[in-house]
Amino acid sequence: MSVVFNIIWILTGGWMTALAFLLAGVLCYLTIIGIPLGRQAFKMASLTLAPFGKTITYGGGTPSLVANVFWVVLVGLWTAIGYALEGALFCCTIVGIPFGLQLFKMAKLALCPFGATVW
């Protein structure tokens, strides 16, 4: 079932968001200081392309916590708010609930991607 949902997700715009995160990651890699941010953008791109059937585990300790604070200030807060609002809109209908839940999963990853692993 997750394959069908992933195909629907990709066809209805998931590829555009993944492409935007991919482009952001490439731009971050142009500077040495932006490489850690670029790695997280690539992580977001992989989840955004096909979120159904993937799980996220969080960990990483203190270095990840410090990096996540910088991430939230730079881009994470507004990205998470956007995903959460869109997820709430999708959850207003029964058909949209599975898609809304995936958007909530992406909102959580947008808040703290450092130390997270996407499976």
Image: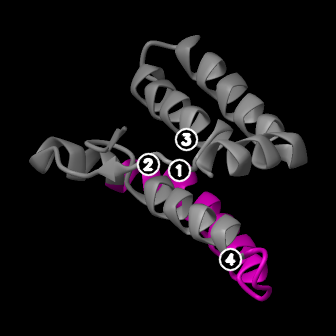
> Are discs 1 and 3 less than 8 Å apart at CB?
no
Q: Kindly identify the amino acid type of the residue bearing the numbered disc 1.
A: Leu
Magenta span of residues: 69-96
Q: State the predominant SS element of the stretch in magenta.
A: helix
Task: Identify the residue shown where x is 60% and y is 49%.
Answer: 2
Instruction: Measuring from the top left, give residue 90's x and y in whole percent.
Output: 76, 76
In the picture shown, does residue 20 fall above or below 26?
Answer: below
Instruction: Measuring from the top left, give residue 103's x and y in whole percent.
Output: 62, 63
According to the picture, the residue beneath numbered tag 2 turns out to be: 71
According to the picture, the residue beneath numbered tag 1 turns out to be: 74
According to the picture, the residue beneath numbered tag 3 turns out to be: 47
Question: For mark 1, does the 10 Å Cα neighbourhood hold few (<14), some (14 to 19), or many (20 or more) residues?
Answer: few
Q: Secondary structure at mark 4?
A: helix
| CA gap, disc 1 and disc 3 | 20 Å
Whichever of callouts 4 and 2 sits on the residue coming sooner in the sequence is: 2
Q: Kindly identify the amino acid type of the residue bearing the numbered disc 2.
A: Trp
